[in-house]
Amino acid sequence: MRVQFPPSAHKNKGWFMKYIKIFMLLWISMLFANSDIYDLIEKTKVTLEQNQEISKDKLYQAAISAYSIEEYKDANSFLRYLVRKLDNEEYKNDLNLWVKRTKEIEILTGRYLDDPGEKDNIIFELEELRYSYDFYRNCDLVEETIPDLLANENILEFENCAYIEYNIGKIHYFEEDYSEALKYYNLASLLNPVNRSYANSLNSVVSKIIKDADEYCDFKDYGTCIEIYLSALENMGENNSNYQSLLYKISRAYYYDKEEERALKYLKKRVDIDIETLLLSNIEDEYFDEKDFKALYLMGECYRKLGDPDNAIKSYTCALNAKEDAKAYYKRGTVYFSIENYDKAAFNYEEAIYLKENYHQAYESLGILFKSQNDDDSAIENFKLALEYDPRNYGCWFRLSNAYNDIGDKYNDKTMYQLAKECAEECLMIKRSYLAAYFEIGRAEYGLGRKFAAITNFEKARNDSQYRKIADSEIKNIQKELSE
């Protein structure tokens, strides 16, 4: 932390007193450049509030400590107590000078509260203080020093500059111009990263900006949402408490906007894992922090949408090693199914069901898997379980109808045809426009020996472009049978 020197107490007491006070300030600043300063401030405040005895040296030490991190209210309060309550006139000059250092800024901010219409003039006057060398040091060089501040390579010594930027930010905050407030609060925090008021104000305005962006995302205006998120990220340090969650929000917005590559860019920053360079065998037994689960899961979703099954599986595996989750098992199962690894697909679907008994999508996917392996009985069992938990799933009714028809064809079983017809009709009851269901009804009617009814339903099915050719073929075959 850069040390900030308060004025010496007495210009007329000689070089020795000046040396002692400057040395004391240097020592205290180094000793308490962290939360210990706040512990000292709080303990001192409690001591004074309870009228407990405290030495003037300890009280002055607390005042200098508070001053060093720009907690001016506490610093001045301690000095006032020294001067007025403990009757130490030797600190009066310090008190007067310390008050003057902050008074001008506080008066300007107070003017805004009395008359917000004066905002522009007041901000201009606050900005002009950067060029005043009475109480401020190097404030006019702050903006050009920002890269050095970000890189922790600054060699300049600033005094009271953070307080100027903080109060400009405060006015923008009162105006609800959160983007501008963010810039100045961030600058104040860069100049004085120890000060909790600056950090808390920065976090507060970031939270408000993110909340505004969240609303745009809720209304599916992802472009505006992302723009605001990125603006917030640009003015936020990696040590900010909102940083990690904001990276995830940006990734999620890009994913919803179907920009999976950009989503992955920010997800990789969020989890700091290069999935693409890792082998699955290297991560199967590696466990991750549960707080990383959502980002790792979303990474899997991105790779899945991009048609990259290997990296999708690795991402879902990392996510599951962070936290067991039914949906992650299910999605990993769908990827395994897509590359025809049916055993692992079935395992993942079953794990999803174990964690979530009513997981109807997992039952339906298991049914599809078994159907692809010509295990119609297992397929029917799982389709029925899926419909038990989601009875309005018209697609599953269609699949169940198809499975019953296949068994009917295999064994010439009229009971199966009747069940197939009922399931297809149930599908149409839920979604009348699902024309594929008419094809299964046509198959069932034909199996039941009702050829004209079969033709009628095949004609309806042919209005679906995917079923036109096969429906025409069935109609021609039946017409040929009828003509013989």
Image (cartoon, grey):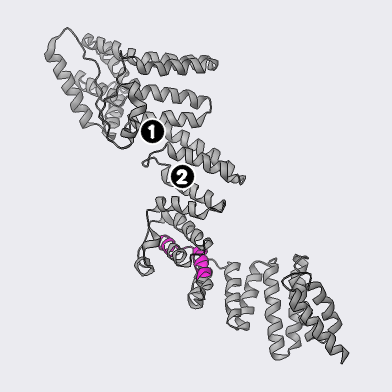
User: Which quadrant of the view contains residue 290?
Assistant: bottom left
Instruction: Label 1, secondary structure: give it.
Output: helix
Whole-percent x, y for residue 366 in the image: 57, 74
**Farthest residue in the left direction?**
16
Whole-percent x, y for residue 261 in the image: 49, 54
Q: Quick check: 183 above or below 262?
A: above
CA neighbours of label 2 inside 10 A, class few (<14), some (14 to 19), many (20+): many
Indicate left or right for 448 with 177 as reference: right
Q: Main secondary structure of the magenta part?
A: helix
Q: Please tell me which residue is depicted at 40% across the width and 25% down the height of the picture.
A: 166
Residue 212 shows in this picture: yes
User: Which quadrant of the view contains residue 86?
Assistant: top left
Which amino acid does the dot numbered 2 rest on? Leu
Nearer to the camera, 110 or 260: 260
Instruction: Label 2, secondary structure: give it.
Output: helix
Residue bearing the label numbered 2? 246
Nearer to the camera, 87 or 133: 133
Q: Quick check: 438 above or below 293?
A: below
